[in-house]
């Protein structure tokens, strides 16, 4: 008979602590997000966008699965800490492979990715021995990840089929949680089977948003530092910074706290964690990455006539970010954020004239929309808080 190895977190004692080793692990993903934005900037074509989307989803999927695991396993215990450090090394290999993942470093990316996904899950199966329900759940997850691994390796082997094979691999992994990781003979997992510490998982996802926003600030600062300093460049720098601040405000002024409160109070936190955090947050992160590319295009050439790629990156990134936030808020409140819908509509109105505007003017219009959404949300949040106090 197998016995409890004593590696689980203790739930039910307040907000789960995000440990320093988890934050250390996250540093790898600062590098990964930077690599993703550079890949999109250098391959700003329909195929390049699909490739970047696939790589972004892969990076997110590795990170969010690991965050789920550290929600259950205590990272302060030496075996789990060692696991995270080993995964950091594999994550560095994965991140370094991203620019050439569809070229000469395909095996570096696929090998590191599969090692992280399958290796981590195999470790969890060992760590949760004695907890029958968790063992069964991770047996199901391992079966799905082994299936997807075959497609990752096949894509790395057959270059001409790499993109469709990797799309199939990722589709398997993305679909599996919504299907309850169903495996013949093992059945499916129910969201109520997942004993999630909601405060910990919501904080982890908020920290990844900070990682993505930090990369955006890094791109803005580095591009400005390398360019010529004049009034136009300074204005472009200020506008890009204002857009990043507005993005931060939109997510962290109320949405992050509302999500934490909702998942903590829910009688089925696993369902909230799966939908609101595992699925919805990837659109928020992707929006920040695309916006960072737009900022780099604008800062490189702020004056003169705009072009389609700058317009698509600037407006598309902001629209994706607002849509992702709107979907997240709808999931946790079941109310549609009118300010976010209005922001996307305003960006759509700018789109027809976007190439007639200078990159600086286009970036200014986009930042103005984001700031307006942030101000509207801040006003609504303060009014709601005041009303709650009065009642």
Image (tube, rainbow, N blue to C red):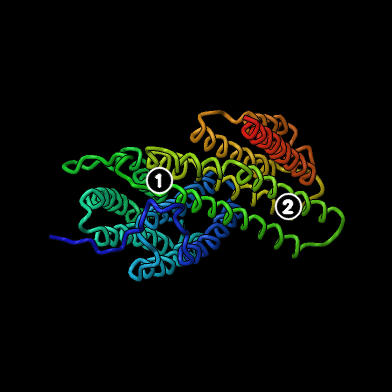
Percent of width and height locating residue 25:
47, 64
Which residue, as the protein is rendered here, is positioned at the far right?
A: 231
Residue 383 point in image, percent of width and height: 68, 33
Disc count in the image? 2
Circle 1 sits in a helix, a strand or a loop, which is it?
helix
Q: Quadrant of the C terminus?
A: top right
Instruction: Look at mark 1 in the image and give the residue it sits on.
Output: 167
Q: Point out residue 142 in the picture as x, y percentages from the top left corner.
A: 27, 52
Q: Circle 2 is placed at which residue position? A: 241
Q: Element type at marker 2?
A: helix
Residue 158 appears anywhere in the view: no
User: Quick one: which residue is furthest to the front in this view?
Assistant: 391
The answer to which of 247 and 228 lies nearer the viewer is 247
Residue 230 visible: yes
Disc 2 from disc 1: Cα separation: 34 Å
Q: Is residue 176 left or right of residue 230?
A: left
Q: Residue at x 30, y 57 (%)?
A: 121
């Amino acid at each position: 008979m197998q016995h409890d190895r004593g590696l689980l977190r203790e739930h039910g004692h307040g907000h789960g602590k995000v440990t320093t080793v988890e934050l250390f692990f996250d540093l790898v993903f600062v590098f990964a997000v930077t690599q993703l934005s550079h890949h999109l900037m250098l391959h700003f074509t329909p195929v390049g966008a699909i490739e970047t989307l696939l790589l972004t989803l892969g990076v997110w999927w590795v990170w969010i699965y690991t965050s789920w695991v550290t929600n259950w396993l205590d990272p302060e215990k030496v075996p789990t800490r060692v696991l995270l450090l080993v995964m950091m090394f594999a994550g560095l290999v994965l991140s370094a492979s991203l620019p050439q993942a569809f070229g000469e470093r395909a095996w570096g990316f696929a090998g590191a990715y599969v090692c992280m996904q399958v290796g981590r899950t195999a470790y969890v199966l060992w760590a949760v021995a004695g907890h029958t329900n968790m063992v069964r759940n991770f047996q199901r997850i391992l079966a799905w990840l082994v299936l997807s691994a075959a497609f990752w390796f096949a894509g790395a082997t057959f270059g001409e089929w790499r993109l469709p094979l990797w799309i199939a691999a990722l589709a398997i992994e993305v679909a599996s949680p919504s299907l309850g990781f169903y495996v013949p003979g093992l059945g499916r997992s129910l969201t109520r089977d997942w004993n999630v510490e909601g405060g910990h998982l919501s904080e982890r996802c908020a920290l990844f948003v900070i990682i993505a926003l930090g990369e955006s600030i890094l791109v803005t600062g580095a591009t400005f530092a390398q360019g010529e300093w004049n009034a136009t460049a300074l204005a472009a720098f200020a506008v890009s910074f204002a857009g990043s601040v507005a993005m931060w405000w939109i997510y962290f002024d109320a949405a992050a706290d509302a999500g934490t409160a909702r998942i903590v109070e829910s009688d089925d936190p696993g369902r909230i964690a799966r939908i609101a955090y595992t699925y919805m947050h990837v659109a928020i992160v992707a929006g920040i990455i695309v916006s960072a590319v737009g900022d780099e295009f604008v800062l490189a050439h702020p004056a003169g006539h705009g072009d389609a790629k700058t317009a698509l990156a600037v407006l598309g990134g902001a629209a994706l970010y607002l849509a992702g936030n709107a979907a997240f808020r709808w999931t946790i409140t079941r109310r549609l954020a009118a300010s976010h819908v209005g922001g996307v509509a305003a960006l759509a109105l700018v789109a027809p004239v976007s190439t007639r505007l200078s990159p600086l003017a286009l970036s200014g219009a986009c930042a103005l929309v984001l700031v307006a959404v942030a101000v509207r949300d801040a006003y609504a949040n303060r009014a709601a808080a005041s009303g709650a106090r009065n009642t």
